[in-house]
Amino acid sequence: MPSDSRMISLGFGKFARADRIYALEPLVGEERGDGRRTRVWVEGIPDPIVASRTEGTILRDMGQDAAADAPLVDEAVDLASRLAAAADAGRVDLSDLGRRARRLLAATTAPPGADRELG
C-alpha cells in the first residue's frame, strides 16, 4: 500500500486515507445496488464502510493498478477456457462468447479513472 497519506474517495462524500485501507470486498447479489458497491475496511474504524465505488476503482486510486486489473485477466482466461471446452465438445455458443468478449474488451478500453466493471 502507498506510504503517503493521500485521501481516496469512496463515493457519496466518504474518504479514507490510502495507507489506512487494508481490505476491500465487492458486494454481490442483493447487497449490491443503490450506490452500494464495495465494503472497505479502514484501520481504526471497527466496521467496514460501504463505498459506492468498485474495488477496482479504489485500488487504482491507491496506486494498485496490477491488483485492480487481476479480475480482467481472470475473465480473459475463463473466456478462453470456455471457448476451448465448447470447441472440443462441438457446441460453440457464438452469441454468449461474443457477449463475453465485447464485455471484456470494453473493460480493457475504459478511460483512465473510469469504473471498469465486468458484471
Image: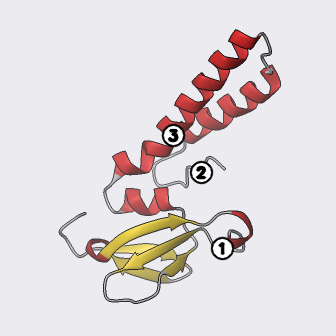
- So how many labels did they put on this image? 3
Residue at 58 percent across and 23 percent down: it is 80
Label 1, label 3: how far apart the Cα atoms are: 22 Å
Which mark is first along the chain, 2 or 1?
A: 1
Percent across and percent down for residue 17 are: 31, 78
Q: Is residue 109 visible?
A: no
Residue furthest to the left in view is 3
Q: Is residue 23 left or right of residue 115?
A: left
CB within 8 Å, label 1 to label 3: no
Camera-nearest residue between 22 and 5: 22
Name the amino acid type tagged 3.
Leu
Name the amino acid type tagged 2.
Glu
Percent across and percent down for residue 74 are: 51, 38
* Residue ID for mark 2: 117
Residue at 26 percent across and 72 percent down: it is 19
Residue furthest to the front in view is 89
Is 29 placed above or below 110 here?
Answer: below
Is 37 placed above or below 57 here?
Answer: below
* Residue ID for mark 3: 72
Hey, which quadrant is residue 60 in on the image?
A: bottom left
* Residue ID for mark 1: 35
* Disc 3, SS: helix
Disc assigned to residue 24: none
Label 1, label 2: how far apart the Cα atoms are: 14 Å
